[in-house]
Image (cartoon, rainbow, N blue to C red):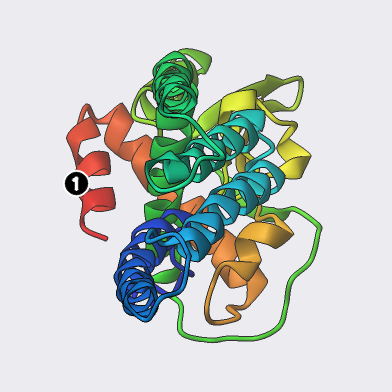
Amino acid sequence: MFRKTKLRGPIGRIYPIFINSALLLAVVEFLIRRELILDGMDISKGPLFVTIIVSLFFAVMGAYQWWRYHLWVYFVLGLIAGASTLQSMCQYSDFFTIQSYIINIMLVFIFIVVTWPVLAGQERFEAKARRLFKLAADSIEETDAGFTTRPYSAGKAHYTNEELAGFARFLKSKHIINPIYRKEGVFMTVSLGRSLVQDPEPGKVSYVLFGKEGEISVNISAFDYRQYTKRFTFDQLCGSLGNTMLRFLEYYQQGHEERIINELKSV
């Protein structure tokens, strides 16, 4: 499915794959330990090695997501999730206690509840960004190693300040883009890397800039460009993303906002 979308898969898909694999390995380790215990070995019956590996997995993934999204909540969540996983060994080891395990589980739950707006906002922004980048690549077949850091001019459009502000508010409310207002105009930012919930500087993420005089320019960040499984011609990709946003603006001006949502859902 991810090859079909021409984009690398989301990082979140690693979790269910790894956890299901870990459960299978845990059963195997448990059976091996049971046989060793029957043979007279004085060892724990629980899957200690798999538990440690899963604990390290949560910590490493938290650190990676912190680096990728620049959101500290992922790092902290990875640490406390890893710690609670490690302390689940209290069931078959005297090193941890059931009390400390329960406290850690409650800490994970409380932390998720408190930081849920950030976690959920990041997931929604990335999911919509993935659809938007997929939509931009759908009409492109030519490929070339043509990345550049310079913005791409995507022509001009006609809109009033009120229309642009309303358009930006609508897209943000649907977690499609995050508007950044600067003297140059409105940067409609989108990203598969650095999180938009932190309002990053436009130069650090991808964007479509709607200028004061109607000029449109597009820039796709190096990180987002590398998420494509095919190396599309950079200018064509920027042009397609700009045309997609201009089409969305026309839908909004005509009062057909639902077409924006339906078009994104189609990919």
- The answer to whether any part of residue 217 appears in the image is no
Residue at 64%, 53% in the rendered image: 60
| Badge 1 amino acid | Asn
- 116 vs 79: above or below: above
The total of numbered circles placed on residues is 1
Using a 10 Å C-alpha cutoff, classify the residue at mark 1 as few (fewer than 14 neighbours), some (14 to 19) or many (20 or more): few
Q: Relative to the observer, which residue lies in front, 80 or 168? A: 80
Residue that label 1 marks: 262
- The answer to whether any part of residue 190 appears in the image is yes
- 47 vs 182: above or below: below
Find residue 37 and report its image quarter: bottom left
Q: Is residue 204 left or right of residue 130?
A: right
Q: Relative to the observer, which residue lies in front, 210 or 86? A: 86
Q: Relative to the observer, which residue lies in front, 56 or 218? A: 56
Residue at 81%, 57% in the rendered image: 150
Q: Quadrant of the N terminus?
A: bottom left
> Where in the figure is residue 20, as x and y percent of width and height?
31, 65
- 203 vs 184: above or below: below
Residue at 43%, 24% in the rendered image: 112
Q: Relative to the observer, which residue lies in front, 98 or 10? A: 98
Q: Is residue 124 left or right of residue 208?
A: left
> Where in the figure is residue 84, as x and y percent of width and height?
48, 36
- 237 vs 122: above or below: below
User: Furthest-right residue in view?
Assistant: 149
Q: Is residue 201 left or right of residue 57?
A: right
> Where in the figure is residue 123, as x and y percent of width and height?
42, 39
> Where in the figure is residue 119, as x and y percent of width and height?
46, 30
Helix, strand or loop at label 1? It is helix
Find residue 170 and report its image quarter: top left
Find residue 267 and report its image quarter: bottom left
Residue at 39%, 37% in the rendered image: 124
